[in-house]
């Protein structure tokens, strides 16, 4: 019996949860600031309408039409495209192995929030006491067992969330999607009422329209939209495959896409209002306290929490609980997409696949809990997102645009939707999106030829980047050729 969502709401919440993740809070606000402030919203919206939503409609249509997970759905277009589906899932696997470690950090910091264990020097605490970071990726060092504990807790939560597939996920997402939104609103209200908040918000949103003349700003907009919607992982194809045949396609794609991007935009208010307060308290300009990624979440924000005039611990708990609930949906969606694909092709028991997937990913994740783990996390993250995902998105568009009747796919999507899409979708899928993604991919390749990523040793870059992608290609081909059970 085919697994299906119990309701449309369950599907929408699961898709929104998959798209919304840690990057909505710590990546988008910084990208917005660095690329024209409020003016960045113009190319961002255009990128959403011409790449993000068309790709979302494409993936929903594939999954819904064939009622199959990513590898088998793509295999229906052309048999060998099944390899692309497996590669997409393996990229997701690569990401979830370190994503779970970051969530493990959140578990640790959730505990630290009760008595503000990080102290006054949050940077020294995070890098020197918590991570015990080494000087380079080649100095791997020992495992940090507190981080391993957080990693184990993460995998228990992830596997519990997908234990019975869509039936379990459909119940869990009611909590893991609504809770972070409630907390986010609390943090926004608290943030905008802090002294200095206005300066932080001005820094975030002041338009620099001259930036729109820089092509890199437009590429940054397309890149952000592409990465933030969880397209290219096989997740949305898999989730759509669990939909009943009478379900909507186009309307759901617009709804999920706008919900994801609204979260990113509002998240910026929570972050930059707090940064404005931090700047006022420390006497530094806002430009010097704006950080992205782990530094923002585990150094800057804990400092801000410690500076709050009252209930600092409570706001620390809320912040890291928000990060955990934001991250859990993205994590278990990547696992569910892979698990469901293996179950569907090889007819294995879900419990065995779930446990096997979790055990392998946890063991791989141990690498990121070492003293050199942060470096390897950074390298793998760069290559998964800037090469793996771009390849999947590019070839998906080529598959539909040139090896399948894309007008037929649009016709199918319209037949299952509350409102219809026109020929603009054909143009985006066949020409615009492949062109933009192709430019992104080629420019990234040129950058890596010129210099190693972040100045890391070429050997480390090869081991954590190119070699991982090569291994994923080989495994994808193996899974494609492996015969499934009848």
Image: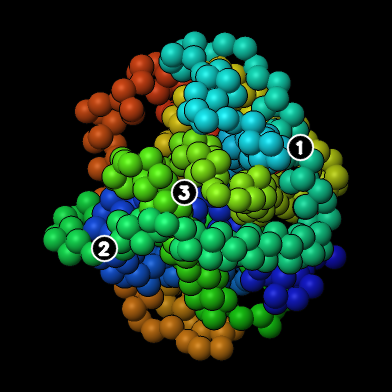
Look at the numbered disc 1 and give the secondary structure of its residue: helix
Q: Of circles 3 and 1, which is in front?
A: 3
* Residue at x-position 81% and y-position 59%: 168
The residue beneath circle 1 is: 153
Mark 3 or 1, nearer chain start: 3
Instruction: Quote the CA–CA distance across marks 1 and 2.
Output: 41 Å
Mark 3 or 2, nearer chain start: 3
* Disc 2 residue crowd, few under 14, some 14–19, many 20+, Cα 10 Å: some
Q: Is residue 50 above or below residue 37?
A: below
* Apparent side of residue 12 relative to residue 50 in the rendered image (left or right): right
Q: Is residue 41 above or below residue 376?
A: below
Q: Of circles 3 and 2, which is in front?
A: 2
* Disc 3 residue crowd, few under 14, some 14–19, many 20+, Cα 10 Å: many
Look at the numbered disc 2 and give the secondary structure of its residue: loop
The image position of residue 131, as x and y in percent, is 57, 23
The image position of residue 202, as x and y in percent, is 30, 61
Instruction: Pick the residue in front: 424 or 299.
Output: 299
The image position of residue 103, as x and y in percent, is 64, 40
Instruction: Pick the residue in front: 268 or 100.
Output: 268
Find residue 206 and name its label: 2
* Residue at x-position 46% and y-position 36%: 295
The image position of residue 362, as x and y in percent, is 70, 31
* Residue at x-position 50% and y-position 28%: 121
Answer whether labels 3 and 1 touch (C-beta < 8 Å). no
Instruction: Quote the CA–CA distance across marks 3 and 2.
Output: 19 Å
* Residue at x-position 23% and y-position 64%: 207
The residue beneath circle 3 is: 26
């Amino acid at each position: 019996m085919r697994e299906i969502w119990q309701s449309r709401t369950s599907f929408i919440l699961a898709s929104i949860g998959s798209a919304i993740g840690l990057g909505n809070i710590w990546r988008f606000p910084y990208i917005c600031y660095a690329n024209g402030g409020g003016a960045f919203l113009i190319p961002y919206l255009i990128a959403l309408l011409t790449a993000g939503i068309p790709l979302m409609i494409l993936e929903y249509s594939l999954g819904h039409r064939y009622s199959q997970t990513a590898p088998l759905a793509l295999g229906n277009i052309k048999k060998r495209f099944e390899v692309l589906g497996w590669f997409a899932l393996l990229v997701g696997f690569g990401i979830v192995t370190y994503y779970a470690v970051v969530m493990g950090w959140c578990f640790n910091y959730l505990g630290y929030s009760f008595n503000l264990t990080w102290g006054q020097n949050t940077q020294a605490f995070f890098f020197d006491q918590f991570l015990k970071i080494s000087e380079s990726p080649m100095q791997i060092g020992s495992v940090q067992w507190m981080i391993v504990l957080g990693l184990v807790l993460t995998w228990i939560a992830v596997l519990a969330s997908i234990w019975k597939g869509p039936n379990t996920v459909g119940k869990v997402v009611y909590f893991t999607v609504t809770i972070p939104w409630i907390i986010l609103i609390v943090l926004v209200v608290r943030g905008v009422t802090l002294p200095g908040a206005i300066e932080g918000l001005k820094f975030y949103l002041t338009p620099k329209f001259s930036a729109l003349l820089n092509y890199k700003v437009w590429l940054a907009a397309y890149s952000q939209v592409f990465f933030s919607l969880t397209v290219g992982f096989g997740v949305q194809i898999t989730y759509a495959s669990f939909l009943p045949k009478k379900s909507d396609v186009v309307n759901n794609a617009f709804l999920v896409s706008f919900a994801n991007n609204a979260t990113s935009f509002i998240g910026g208010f929570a972050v930059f209002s707090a940064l404005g307060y931090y700047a006022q308290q420390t006497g530094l300009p806002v430009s010097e306290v704006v950080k992205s990624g782990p530094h923002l979440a585990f150094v800057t924000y804990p400092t801000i929490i410690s500076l709050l005039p009252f209930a600092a611990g409570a706001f620390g708990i809320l912040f890291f609980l928000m990060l955990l609930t934001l991250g859990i949906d993205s994590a278990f969606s990547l696992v569910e997409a892979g698990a469901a694909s293996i179950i569907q092709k090889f007819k294995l028991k879900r419990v065995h696949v779930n446990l096997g997937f979790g055990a392998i990913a946890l063991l791989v994740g141990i690498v990121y809990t070492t003293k050199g783990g942060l470096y390897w996390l950074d390298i793998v993250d760069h290559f998964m997102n800037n090469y793996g995902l771009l390849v999947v998105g590019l070839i998906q568009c080529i598959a539909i645009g040139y090896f399948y009747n894309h007008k037929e796919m649009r016709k199918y999507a319209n037949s299952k939707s509350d409102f219809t899409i026109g020929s603009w979708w054909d143009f985006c899928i066949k020409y615009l999106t492949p062109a933009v993604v192709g430019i992104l991919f080629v420019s990234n390749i040129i950058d890596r030829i010129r210099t190693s990523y972040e100045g890391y040793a070429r050997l480390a870059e090869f081991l954590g980047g190119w070699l991982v992608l090569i291994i994923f290609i080989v495994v994808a081909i193996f899974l494609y050729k492996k015969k499934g059970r009848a």
